[in-house]
Amino acid sequence: MSWRLIPIDKRSPALHQAEFGCLKRAYAINVTRGCSFYCVYCYARGYAIAPSKGTVYLYQNLPLLLQKEARRLPMGTPIIFNTASECFQNHPHILEITYRSMAILLRRGHHINFLTKGVVPKWFKDLFCRYHHHIQATIDVVSLKEDYCNLFEPGAPIGEKRLEGAIHLLNWGIPVKARLDPLIPFFSDTQENIENLLLAIKDCGIRKIIISYLELRPRIIEQLRQELPASIAKLILGCFPKPSWDRVGTKTLCKQVPLSIREKVYQRIRQQGEKLGIKVIVCRCKNPDVSFSQYCLSKSGLPKYKRLSQPVLL
């Protein structure tokens, strides 16, 4: 899939304070605006500031901004990468800015946590090994089938490559979790798919996963209809029978798979994981109505932060 990268300067601060679910009391950063992976279910593609498909903006001045902002944060402040983008897109300029940004934060004594569908390049090894106690990684993978990835995540590395990358991170001393999100009815929530994926996750050495079903937002519905075969889009949308919209979190309006189905499948995956020695957490941010859900990140160890002097925008 062809796309172009446009370097721009970020006018607002590099870091913004997250205000949703388990991300509260942490700072967040996005290296790009837009993403070349073009996942059909991506909510960030529906933002008003999102670029058109085929274009990704790179915040080329992030290291300069972080040199100033990182000094004003308490030592050990958690920084979350990729709340609305992907810092490990396979482009040398994106990876360079990612490396320089992470290096600044780590050398200032801060902690970084990233969620990725990408693969961390091997030339990050020395930096990550040196600061492995300050890094947490989560690999997002919901299927090892190449057909699935090509259909739903056409620009991203296939699941097998992501898990190979996870092995490298584990060998570097980085704690790694897997995130099975979004589970898509009839495609990635099947017993066969989950069994094969959990076995592969176990073989990698990962012992903790986070799971959640697909949520529908108005723009996601449009993307599914525009980018998937009509029969597949109809099948998926038929799994969201409720005509009204629910409010999840503080602002988000969405539609969810019925609670009874989510609970049944989540329990099944928990049992499958328990047999393999894998701890399974149901994401509370997206499933506040599930009684056994939990926050993805622990709040207990997050330090208080000082507000930046400027209003912070994505």
Image (cartoon, helix red, strand yellow):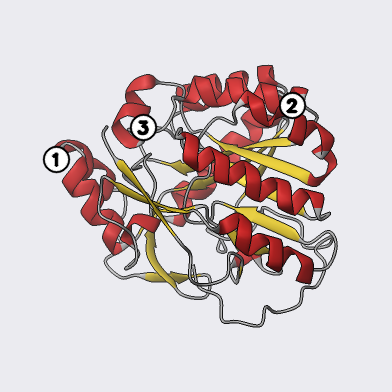
Helix, strand or loop under label 2: helix
Q: Is residue 242 left or right of residue 297?
A: left
Say which residue appears at 62% left-offset and 60% top-offset. Answer: 64
- Which quadrant would residue 52 be assigned to in this image? bottom left
Q: Which mark is residue 230?
A: 1
* Percent position of residue 212, x then y: 52, 47
For badge 2, the amino acid type reads: Leu
Residue that label 2 marks: 170
Nearest to N terminus: mark 2 or mark 1? 2
Alpha carbon separation for disc pair 3 and 1: 15 Å
Q: Is residue 284 visible?
A: no
Alpha carbon separation for disc pair 2 and 1: 40 Å
Q: Which mark is residue 300?
A: none
When the figure is inspected, residue 107 is found, relative to residue 172, above or below; the finding is: below
Q: Nearer the viewer, residue 144 or 231?
A: 144
Residue that label 3 marks: 187
Q: Nearer the viewer, residue 298 or 65?
A: 65
Say which residue appears at 45% left-offset and 41% top-offset. Answer: 183
* Percent position of residue 170, x then y: 74, 26
Q: Is residue 4 visible?
A: yes
When the figure is inspected, residue 260 is found, relative to residue 265, above or below; the finding is: below
For badge 1, the amino acid type reads: Ala
Alpha carbon separation for disc pair 2 and 3: 29 Å
